[in-house]
Image: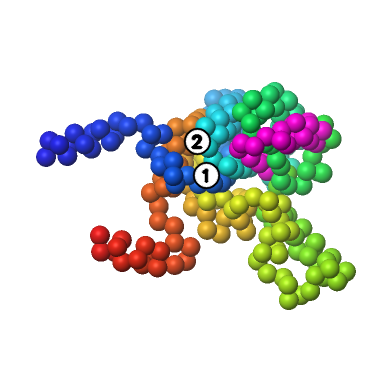
């Protein structure tokens, strides 16, 4: 009994990062960064104050993901619905985006991180597009983590764009009706060059997907935390990954089909 108690205590004291199985890391994690406005309001400040402090969460999370050796990280930074927010907040967010990309480009290059973006980029202010494209160009030869920013993005917008483009190809005779399938449809999505995320994390205690990667997360594992995004740090990320690794992913199959009878009989 003493050995069991000591063994359990030792396991509890092991840092979360060291309990992660490096052989079972997800290839792609997507994060819905939520709660920055509430974080600021809880402290009696304007919402932009929370977004400013959220930069530290982004930096720490990106560095942690890169250190673990994951291949893809998608951050839901600004949705098409966010344009409906007060103009003062949107303007402040765009200004913050420009300054953050400018300041963090050096960090991306230092850590061999490749920056990419999805969404209706053409709808962003010209100065945002310019700074974003500059960072993407500077990091395009990097071979480490692919950091994907979802900007002016919504999944319904993306799916509609894919449908329209396929319709144009049908009209022009480039493709035939019989050729339309899952694979062809995915080739017309913004994410055609990326694998689907295995793990989706949403902060702030909300249990919604909020129009994010609806097609791509059909079989993703969802992880919700009450932590507001500005307070999110690498330890929170490690907890999410550990939770992911303790789940059984079956993709519509039974456990017996995937593991055989050994799991059932064990």
Q: Which mark is residue 245?
A: none
Mark 1 burial class by Cα count in 10 Å: few <14, some 14-19, many 20+: many
Quadrant in the picture for the N terminus = top left
- Residue 214, given in percent of the width and then of the height, sits at 61, 56
Under circle 2, the secondary element is: helix
| Residue 196 in view here | yes
The residue under the point 40% across, 68% down is 257
Within the image, what quadrant is residue 171 found in? bottom right
| Residue 228 in view here | no
Q: Which one is in front, 9 or 146?
A: 146
Under circle 1, the secondary element is: strand
The residue under the point 80% across, 70% down is 175
Locate residue 93 relative to residue 57 in the image: left or right.
right
The residue under the point 47% across, 44% down is 25
The residue under the point 50% across, 30% down is 233
Camera-nearest label, 2 or 1: 2
Q: Which mark is residue 201?
A: 1
Q: How many marks?
A: 2
Within the image, what quadrant is residue 122 found in? top right
Q: Is residue 168 above or below residue 59?
A: below
- Which residue bears the numbered disc 2? 68
Q: Is residue 50 above or below residue 150?
A: above
Q: Which residues are magenta?
A: 128-150
Instruction: Give the farthest residue toward the left.
Output: 1
- Residue 200, given in percent of the width and then of the height, sits at 53, 47
- Looking at marks 2 and 1 on the same chain, the residue that comes earlier in the sequence is marked by 2
Whether residue 133 is in magenta: the answer is: yes
Whether residue 260 is in magenta: the answer is: no
Distance (Cα) linking label 2 and label 1: 17 Å
- Residue 67, given in percent of the width and then of the height, sits at 52, 32
């Amino acid at each position: 009994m003493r050995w069991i108690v000591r063994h359990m205590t030792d396991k509890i004291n092991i840092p979360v990062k060291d309990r992660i199985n490096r052989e079972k890391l997800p290839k792609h994690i997507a994060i819905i960064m939520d709660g920055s406005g509430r974080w600021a309001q809880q402290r009696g400040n304007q919402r932009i104050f929370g977004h400013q402090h959220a930069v530290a969460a982004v930096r720490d999370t990106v560095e942690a993901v890169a250190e673990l050796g994951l291949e893809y990280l998608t951050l839901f930074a600004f949705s098409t619905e966010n344009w409906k927010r007060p103009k003062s907040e949107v303007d402040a967010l765009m200004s913050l985006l420009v300054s953050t990309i400018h300041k963090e480009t050096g960090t991306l290059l230092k850590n061999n991180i490749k920056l990419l973006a999805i969404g209706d980029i053409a709808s962003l202010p010209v100065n945002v597009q310019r700074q974003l494209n500059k960072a993407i160009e500077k990091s395009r030869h990097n071979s480490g983590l692919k950091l994907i920013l979802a900007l002016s993005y919504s999944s319904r917008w993306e799916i509609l764009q894919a449908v329209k483009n396929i319709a144009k190809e049908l009209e022009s005779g480039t493709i035939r009706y019989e050729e339309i399938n899952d694979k062809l449809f995915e080739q017309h999505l913004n994410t055609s060059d990326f694998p689907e995320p295995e793990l989706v994390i949403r902060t702030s205690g909300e249990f919604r997907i909020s129009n994010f990667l609806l097609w791509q997360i059909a079989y993703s594992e969802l992880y919700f935390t009450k932590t507001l995004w500005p307070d999110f740090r690498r330890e929170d990320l490690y907890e999410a990954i550990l939770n992911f690794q303790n789940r059984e992913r079956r993709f519509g199959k039974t456990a017996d089909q995937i593991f055989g009878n050994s799991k059932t009989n064990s």
